[in-house]
C-alpha cells in the first residue's frame, strides 16, 4: 500500500430498505462490488476530496444508483467512454452494474486517477481502464458506442467534449437535472454542427428509484 492509499475503515452508509431493493434489482450478483464502491466513496473518496462529507448519507440513492441505471440504455457488449470520471460517477457505477460493457474513464486530475485505479484494483473490475487526459486529448485514441458524463459542464460545452469521442451511430448519454430542456435548446446548433442528431430527454430507473435519473440522449450520425 502506498502512502496515498487509504484502507476502507469504519462504517459506511447502509442503503435504506427502498434503496436496498433497488440495489439488488440494479446490481444483482454484482451487489458486493457495489457495496465496496460505496465504502471507498465514504472513506478514501471523502478523505481525498472527491466528494463532500455531506454526500455520505446520499451515496446510494443520489449517486451510485442514480448513475448505474443509465446502463439500461446500453446494448450488451458495447463500449463506453466516461468523460470527467472524478469519483467514478457514472463510470464505475455502470461498470459494476454491467460487467459485459467495456469502460474507458477519462479524467485529467492525477489524484483522481490514482484513486480510480485503486478502487478498480481493489474491486477487481477487469472491464475498466483509466486514461489521465482531457477529453479533447483522447479524440482519435478511444471512441465509445456510448459516451457518458455527469455534472461536468453545460451541454453546449459538453457536446464538444463528448460527440467527437462517440462512434458513428453511437450516443452521448449526459446525466442532467431540471435544466435539461433549457440546456438542449441552447446547445442545438453546436450539437448539429458536431454531428449530433436531435437531442432528447429520457428518464431511467422509474421502476426502482424514488427519483428517476434524467438523461439527455444525443444520437450521433452514422456518416
Image (spheres, helix red, strand yellow):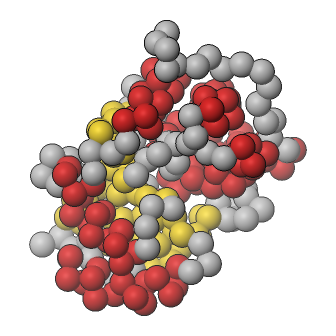
Q: Residue at x 73, y 58 (%)?
A: 209
Q: Vertical placement of 89 versus 131: above or below? A: below
Counting from the top left corner in percent of width and height, residue 185 is at 42, 90
Tell me where residue 46 sits by quadrant: top right
Q: Left or right: where does residue 96 sit relative to residue 111? A: right
Q: Vertical placement of 19 versus 32: above or below? A: below
Q: Vertical placement of 39 versus 60: above or below? A: above
Q: Left or right: where does residue 111 sit relative to residue 24? A: left
Q: Quadrant of the C terminus?
A: bottom left
Counting from the top left corner in percent of width and height, residue 160 is at 27, 70
Counting from the top left corner in percent of width and height, residue 43 is at 67, 29
Tell which residue pokes out farthest to the right in this image. Answer: 17
Tell which residue pokes out farthest to the top in this image. Answer: 1
Q: Residue at x 76, y 30 (%)?
A: 12
Q: Left or right: where does residue 210 sit relative to residue 121? A: right
Q: Vertical placement of 161 versus 34: above or below? A: below
Q: Residue at x 58, y 40 (%)?
A: 49
Can residue 94 be seen in the rendering of this structure? no
Count of marks, rendered view: 0
Q: Residue at x 22, y 57 (%)?
A: 136
Can residue 88 be seen in the rendering of this structure? yes
Counting from the top left corner in percent of width and height, residue 31 is at 65, 32
Q: Left or right: where does residue 34 sit relative to residue 187? A: right
Amino acid at each position: 500500500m502506498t502512502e496515498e492509499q487509504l484502507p476502507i475503515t469504519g462504517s459506511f452508509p447502509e442503503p435504506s430498505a427502498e434503496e436496498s431493493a433497488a440495489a439488488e434489482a440494479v446490481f444483482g450478483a454484482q451487489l458486493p462490488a457495489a457495496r465496496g464502491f460505496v465504502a471507498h466513496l465514504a472513506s478514501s473518496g471523502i478523505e481525498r476530496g472527491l466528494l463532500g462529507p455531506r454526500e455520505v448519507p446520499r451515496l446510494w440513492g443520489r449517486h451510485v444508483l442514480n448513475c448505474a441505471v443509465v446502463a439500461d440504455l446500453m446494448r450488451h457488449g458495447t463500449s463506453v467512454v466516461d468523460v470527467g470520471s472524478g469519483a467514478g460517477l457514472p463510470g464505475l457505477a455502470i461498470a459494476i452494474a454491467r460487467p459485459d460493457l467495456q469502460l474507458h474513464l477519462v479524467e485529467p486530475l492525477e489524484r483522481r486517477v490514482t484513486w480510480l485505479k485503486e478502487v478498480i484494483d481493489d474491486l477487481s473490475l477487469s472491464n475498466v481502464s483509466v486514461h489521465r487526459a482531457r477529453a479533447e486529448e483522447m479524440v482519435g485514441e478511444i471512441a465509445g458506442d456510448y459516451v457518458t458524463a455527469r455534472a461536468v459542464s453545460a451541454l453546449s460545452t459538453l457536446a464538444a467534449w463528448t460527440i467527437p469521442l462517440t462512434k458513428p451511430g453511437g450516443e452521448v448519454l449526459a446525466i442532467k437535472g431540471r435544466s435539461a430542456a433549457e440546456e438542449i435548446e441552447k446547445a442545438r446548433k453546436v450539437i448539429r454542427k458536431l454531428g449530433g442528431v436531435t437531442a432528447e430527454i429520457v428518464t431511467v430507473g422509474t421502476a426502482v428509484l424514488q427519483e428517476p435519473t434524467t438523461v439527455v440522449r444525443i444520437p450521433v450520425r452514422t456518416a
